[in-house]
Amino acid sequence: MGNFADMTPGQELISAYWTAANARDWAVYSDLLADDVVYEAPQSGERVTGKAAYMRFNIEGFPGDWHLTVARVVGDDQGAASWIQMTDSDGTYPGLSFFDIIDGRIAKITDFWPQEYEPSGSRAHLAERFSL
Amino acid sequence: MGNFADMTPGQELISAYWTAANARDWAVYSDLLADDVVYEAPQSGERVTGKAAYMRFNIEGFPGDWHLTVARVVGDDQGAASWIQMTDSDGTYPGLSFFDIIDGRIAKITDFWPQEYEPSGSRAHLAERFSL
């Protein structure tokens, strides 16, 4: 991702979003969101509409002792994507998010939470195996 | 994603990569890859190193009648991310990829294939449900 000075405005915004989330700095977090922000998680079909509802979803919906690190942020002032590593009572696992950005604020978040799987046997001879 | 003229070099590269994959235009696809390209799928721990091995992985590893559409590409000339919708014998499902780009070619691909899940009951009252 390079150092902060090399970041695009979109990368700065998304990095600040995750820093605020990890710190539970909900005032800063809220300021980064558009008033009509929409959150969607396509895997579970969850959708949350509007800043007030999305703040409740975050503050009340995930009460455990989670923390996160940012693995990667790409994008520009119109859209971005991030890969975080989330640690909670289930262990450490990746979270992928796409962001729509309007006027410097996050207007839409689409979250994905992939799980481990075994590769198809038909291609097992075509790849090595590693663990993160 | 806007029209082609609005794309960054990174968005153009990744869009061309998926167009070539969907068309099985392996000559074009190969040209977009660095010689020492690395592919990783963290969920399954699969890793493929080098263009020749990665071409075999794609051509021989996924013999079925799949096709894909691009939902989203973000990024710039150093890194990008894409969200595709893949259709194969299992149905239609999302694929998320992060790309390292060096000198206009794809140097690293990190793929994620999220599955459906049920949201935690503790936050069920905090979100609507939708389906794509």
Image (spheres, coloured by chain):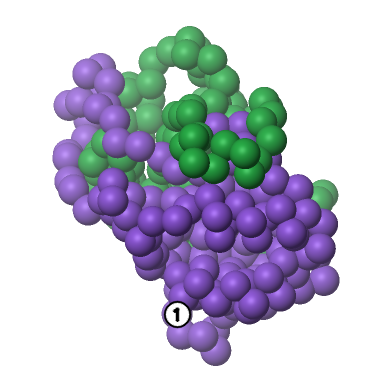
Chain colours: A green, B purple
Q: Residue furthest bottom?
A: B5
Q: In which quarter of the view is residue B86 placed?
A: bottom left
Q: On the rendered structure, is B82 left or right of B121?
A: right
Indicate the chain on which mark 1 is placed: B
Q: Position of residue A83 (x, y in %)?
A: 58, 42
For the image, the number of numbered tags is 1
Question: Mark 1 = which residue?
Answer: B2
Q: Name the foreground residue: A46 vs A130.
A: A130
Above or below, B13 relative to A99: below
Above or below, B101 relative to B108: below
Query: Label 1 is placed on what type of residue?
Result: Gly
Q: Name the foreground residue: B34 vs B76.
A: B34
Q: Position of residue B132 (x, y in %)?
A: 22, 53
Q: Position of residue A69 (x, y in %)?
A: 64, 30
Name the residue rendered at 78%, 65% in the picture. Answer: B34
Residue A9 visible in this rendered orientation of the protein: no
Q: Secondary structure at mark 1?
A: loop
Name the residue rendered at 74%, 59% in the picture. Answer: B52
Name the residue rendered at 47%, 53% in the picture. Answer: B62
Residue B66 visible in this rendered orientation of the protein: yes
Q: In which quarter of the view is residue B54 placed?
A: bottom right
Name the residue rendered at 39%, 64% in the picture. Answer: B68
